[in-house]
Amino acid sequence: MRLAAAVSVVAAMLLWRPPGRWLLRHRLGRRAVEVSRHRVAAAGVAVVVLSLAGQVRGPRLVLAGTVVGIGVFAVRLLGASRRHELVRRRRAEVAEVLGLLAAELRAGLLPVRTLSGLAADFDFLAPAARAADLGADVPAALREASAATGREALLEVAAAWHVAERSGAPLAMVLGRLEDAVRDRREVEREVQAGAGPARATGRLMAVLPVVGLGLGSGMGGDPVAVLTTTWVGVGCLAAGCALACLGVAWVERIASAAEMPP
């Protein structure tokens, strides 16, 4: 109990102490952000595991560790899914920006005015628009924006902008061709995503299929849940099965993500 209390105090201190990013935004007068989800999850897991270690013994301790492990894996899987969705959204935004830039330049608008107009709808173009208004280095600002995952195509826009400034080459034609290339890549990615979807769904289905077996066993008059949660052999099999299921899902997700999100 003393160990659990000490861990609870440490976790409370970690949760109370705001991260540096929160302090920076608060001092700058910006909207405050919540405490990092990873810090909350880590502190919560530490409190639960060590509290259970002081109160739960025997097979139930292994069972508690298995449940916590599955929870951590699910959180990480959800975070990876959200990151991939963010990358896809960024790539769609870059493709849209390229199309709008090329169209407005072909219509006769100046590049500086075009950037300023698009920066109101696309925040990542704001540094480049400010650089264009001040007569600074626009390609450098675009290269900096391309550092974010999913916006790598802006690096090619920066190169085209640099060549247009130095040689006077028509920027609209280059951006139009770049837009076609980016849209072709996105079309290929969508086809790969559609092809990887069934494999991903099958992996997740196979991971939860043993739960159906538990229901069938209970319906036939057995008690598989009690065996898996109260005996050493049962919790050992349960922990090993859950670990293998998580490993299989992670393997399928990694293969699918590598195909969907090429560098």
Image (cartoon, rainbow, N blue to C red):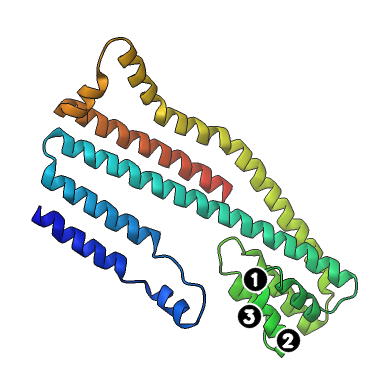
* x and y, in percent, of residue 189 in the image: 64, 47
Q: Would residue 241 be found to the left or right of residue 79 on screen?
A: left
Give, as a three-letter code, the residue at label 3.
Ala
Give the quadrant of residue 39.
bottom left
Give, as a three-letter code, the residue at label 2.
Asp
* x and y, in percent, of residue 257 in the image: 52, 46
Q: Nearer the viewer, residue 92 or 41?
A: 41
Q: Is residue 259 visible?
A: yes
Q: Is residue 262 visible?
A: no
The disc placed on residue 133 is: 2
Element type where label 1 sits in the image: helix
| 3D distance between C-alphas at marks 1 and 3 | 16 Å
Labels 2 & 1 near each other (Cβ < 8 A): no
- Residue for point 71% across, 89% down: 134
Q: Which residue is mark 3?
A: 140
Dot 1 or dot 3, earlier in sequence:
1
* x and y, in percent, of residue 200 in the image: 51, 36
Give, as a three-letter code, the residue at label 1.
Asp
| 3D distance between C-alphas at marks 2 and 1 | 16 Å
